[in-house]
Amino acid sequence: MAERLAASASLLPSAASPSSSTRRATVASGLRLRPSPSRFSQAASRGRGVAGAAGVVPRLRVVRCMAASEAAQLKSAREDIKEILKTTYCHPILVRLGWHDSGTYDKNIEEWPQRGGADGSLRFDPELSHGANAGLTSALKLIQPIKDKYPGITYADLFQLASATAIEEAGGPKLPMKYGRVDITAPEQCPPEGRLPDAGPRLPAEHLREVFYRMGLDDKEIVALSGAHTLGRSRPDRSGWGKPETKYTKDGPGEPGGQSWTAEWLKFDNSYFKDIKEQRDQELLVLPTDAALFDDPSFKVYAEKYAEDQEAFFKDYAEAHAKLSNLGAKFDPPEGFSLDDDKGAVATEEKVVADPAPASDTNSTGPQPEPFVSAKYSYKKRELSDTMKQKIRAEYEGLGGSPNKPMKSNYFLNIMIVIAGLAFLTSLTGN
């Protein structure tokens, strides 16, 4: 079975390229390494070569190879995230963490990880220092203890798990998430700056389309995802937008200050669309890209719909969020797995490998006896009755055999002699 080296990585690694020895010592968690062959495996390989030459077919067995992240650890991490949300009210910044890790995806680039996307790159300093990621150091400080506690999960999965859990715990829809994302391993693999949207571009609608179309998203998904601004605040010291505080944020919860888009900025609902449409409360924030949702004819169709129909908003948002969280990701297993699906929860890949054939030297113990299975001795495909099975087993054990031990050869010899003698006597009698 493949093994995973889960070495703990520092929160903010240096952007300098590490030496080869350092890389071996600080491999990002989730990297799957192939162990060097042991003496046993080398001997087995030699045995397979001998068996193949002799025409012996080796036995097959199923080996389970672990995925990029372990489902059980992801489930436990989700519970820990819920506890953090209850005490720190960090829903908005965790949503932003997941979005900004996946939002660097470029559909025009096929190679991974050059294409960007949900690959855990945001933990490295070169990307964390991008202007659009100001303030996300706080999110990483909240998440890092969970990563240390559960080394069997990747940063890429943890970021998206935190984002989805924050949405659901704030009252949002259940998101159809999947996991198994592979992490990048070095700062040099981070995407370039400039792929995330700006808050106040000269042409807001065109800018939104330029950024989100590059990711492969459409107008409906742009508007639906914008609805996540129902959570959180904008702080002028981080983004350059918003007021230092308002009547909705001066007392928290959490760290006070900033300007929110909605009055209840820790509740996920469709009030963002309602408030932008009405624009009656000067205490609430409306960015140029927010206003564009009702100014642009195509965007307006969806914005109006979501302002009137929260159920429709939840449905479209859940699909768009899950799609965003998968952008650019490299999954192991390739199809990913769900934490809410019993089949996917195993998160393993089955492979059939050949066991070496038994060695032919005199020191070999030879194959183990096959357990007794009464059905193998039934007539054609008809199964014996329980009574007959018990009778056969009693007679078998009476002769010295057992379910796990074949009868010694002398018993078979005695039986054959008796049968031959009876046949001979019958033949004489008949004559």
Image: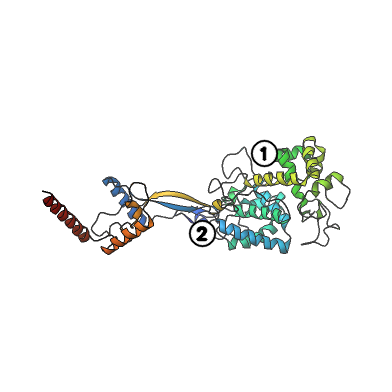
Measured as percent of width and height from the top left, residue 378 is found at: 33, 51
Residue at x-position 23% and y-position 58%: 362
Q: Which residue is mark 1?
A: 214
Q: Secondary structure at mark 2?
A: helix
Residue at x-position 52% and y-position 58%: 22
Q: Residues within 10 Å of mark 1 (few under 14, many from 20)?
A: some
Distance from disc 2 to disc 1, alpha carbons, whole Å, reads 37 Å
Q: Secondary structure at mark 1?
A: helix
Residue at x-position 59% and y-position 63%: 149
Foreground residue, 188 or 235? Answer: 235
Give amino acid for label 1: Arg
Q: Earlier in the sequence, mark 2 or mark 1?
A: 2
Q: Quadrant of residue 257?
A: bottom right
Give amino acid for label 2: Ala
Q: Is residue 209 above or below residue 29?
A: above
Question: Which residue sits furthest top?
Answer: 297
Q: Quadrant of residue 114?
A: top right
Q: Which residue is mark 2?
A: 25
Foreground residue, 107 or 411? Answer: 411
Q: Is residue 400 left or right of residue 228?
A: left
Foreground residue, 226 or 270? Answer: 270
Foreground residue, 414 or 385? Answer: 385
Tell me how the rendering is colored: rainbow
Task: Report whether residue 28 is seen.
Answer: no
Task: Report whether residue 291 is seen.
Answer: yes
